[in-house]
Amino acid sequence: MAQGWSDGSAAETGLRIRRLRSQRGLSLSELARRAGIGKATLSGLETGTRNPTAGTLYAIAGQLGVPLAALLTTPGAAPPAVPDLHGDAITATLLEAFTDGGVSTELYRLRIRPGPAQTSPAHGPGVVEYLTVFSGTALVGPVGAPVVVRAGEHASWLAEGPHTYAALDESVVEAGLLIRHPLAE
């Protein structure tokens, strides 16, 4: 069952965004501009009065130079009940996030709904995504060069540019998505 954004989880995510933005010396206006979102949207996220979409959080995380999980969880804290992230075509559930050997790794359960494609914004330099499809058929990868992945197959791509997720038939694609972020030295 999908979890909804409670006032508490939205507020905690907003505080993490504000803290990371401040640490990087970015104004609200500058981060909103860089992420391609409205200033009012970013302000609402930071105050916990707006529920974020997957695309919005990915855009913010990319501009802050952090993995998405850094906006959803606090490093070293007990794993919280993180709400599902919803986008135009996807629902993502964070299953695990950890750092080892200079790499941050996130594991998601990904569901791709039939209909419109989901375009995810670019991640930071060196970020690689690995998708394993358990059921259905997906079209995934860099915009302009996506690949077809069927049940039992996997694909990987450098996620430094916009990339897409789409279901190719009328069934929901069930998949695992692993994202590896090299950490700044």
Image: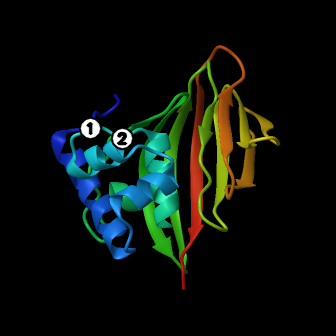
Above-or-below relation of 98 to 44: below
Query: Residue lying furthest left in this view?
Result: 8
Q: Nearer the viewer, residue 38 or 150?
A: 38
Asked which secondary structure carries label 1, the reply is: loop
Please tell me which residue is depicted at 36% across the width and 66% down the height of the picture. 21
Taking the spot 65% from the left edge, 54% from the top edge, the residue there is: 129
Foreground mark, 2 or 1?
2
Relative horizontal placement of residue 82, taking residue 38 as reference (left or right):
left
Quarter of the picture containing the C terminus is bottom right
Can you say whether 121 is above or below 31 in the image?
A: above
Crowd tier of the residue under label 2, counting other residues whose Cα lies within 10 Å: few below 14, some 14–19, many 20 or above: many
Q: Which residue is mark 2?
A: 52
Identify which residue is drawn at 72% across, 22% down. Answer: 168
Q: Residue furthest front?
A: 29
> Circle 1: is it few (<14), some (14-19), or many (20+) Cα within 10 Å?
some
Q: Is residue 69 visible?
A: no
Q: Is residue 133 above or below residue 17?
A: above
Locate residue 80 relative to residue 174 in the image: left or right. left
